[in-house]
Image: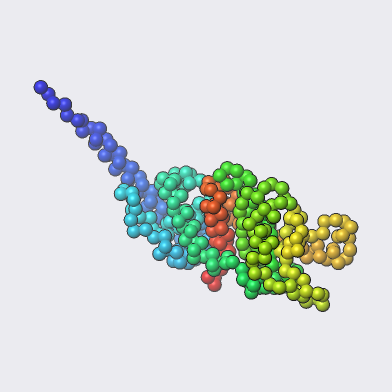
Amino acid sequence: MDIPTSSSSGIETDVEETHRHRRRRRRAYHNILRLMVELDSHEELFESLFGLSRIDFERLQSMISGDIARNHTQFRHMNPIRSRDRLGICLRFLTSGSSFQSLGVSYNMQSAIIETIVLEVCDSILHYLQSLVMPRPTKAMWKKIAAGFKGRYQMPNCIGSLNGRFVTVMGKIDHILLSLVDSDEKFVMIDLGNYGTKASKIWDNSRMGALFARNEFDIPEDQSPGFGTDELPFVIVGGNSFVIKPYLISKYRSNALADTDANKVFNCRIDPVKLTAEAAVTRLRRRWQIVQSNIPLPVPMAKRVITTACCLENYFGSPNI
């Protein structure tokens, strides 16, 4: 009587397929390494792919490498991904606006691995960079911002230019990115949330607006703008869609009000201040295209990603950091 034996051909086929799969992943990873080396000699291409100059990239990598380096991986067929390459993957997600799935195809990695790398590196960038390039403002910092607007635009007591822009989170275009920018077009703070679609209510519904209303940002006391007038409050400048507050102003919209010489001068000074935030957000969206793409993450994680992009934009070309 013959005893049935298991065929070895099926097992051999599975083993061969596993080996082929491992070889493909190794080749893909070595392609990443080779690409990073080749790009070192092509500065413009490097910057277009990763959003940073090679020098800024290396400075950032040395800053966070100890935090994002991994000595082992849960996948037996993969070597640990170097910190430099993990940073590169995260920056490609931010600059390309691609989904985790499409980046997974590009790097021949599972989308879950790409997502884990992106979120871990974003957290590390925020940990090391945010306190340097986008800290919570102090009273002294507000006064420095005001001095910048006064010196550049003859707009005294101004502590920021405010912009609001819709962004897409999890396929829904119902979240507002509020950005407060200084005279150098650097981001001072941002806020992201579903604050409704009615322009007049967005600021009141936002967390940033609530904190300003409760005066929780350590704004300096009123001071004279230096033209022999009484003391005036420090203010932020927003577009005409924002409702006027004691600390939030915009240009005169009524022809009757804007027709006086003093108010015409005021409007002329308001316009370039308002444009600083618009220019900063436009540049942010152009360099870090994830901001204008569908962010495939819940709102808290999406805010971490956008805050990371803002920190990187402030960091770009900052030699003193």
Does residue 3 appear to the left or right of 152 in the view shown? Answer: left
Identify the image quadrant of the N terminus: top left
The image position of residue 275, as x and y in percent, is 71, 60
In the image: residue 217, left or right of residue 223:
left
Its colouring scheme is rainbow
Is residue 45 something one can see in this rendering?
no
Q: Residue at x 58, y 52 (%)?
A: 291
**Residue 195: x, y in percent?**
65, 50
Q: Residue furthest left?
A: 1
Residue 263: percent from the left, percent from the top?
A: 85, 64
Of all residues, the one furthest to the front in this rendering is 214
- Residue 234 position (above or below residue 297): below
Front residue of 317/162: it is 162
Q: Nearer the viewer, residue 177 or 11?
A: 177
Look at the picture and state if 247 lies above or below 193.
below
Measured as percent of width and height from the top left, residue 145 is found at 67, 70
Q: Seen in the image, is 225 located left or right of residue 278? A: right
Image-quadrant location for residue 234: bottom right
Residue at the spot x=30%, y=49% of the render? 76
Q: Quadrant of residue 172?
A: top right
Relative side of 148 to 37, left or right: right
Q: Residue at x 53, y 70 (%)?
A: 321
Q: Name the residue: 43% across, 46% down.
A: 112
Whether residue 263 appears in this view of the structure is yes
Q: Splitting the image into 4 quarters, where does residue 223 fall?
A: bottom right
Q: Examine the rendered structure and indicate whether residue 319 appears above or below residue 309.
A: below
Q: What is the count of numbered marks?
A: 0
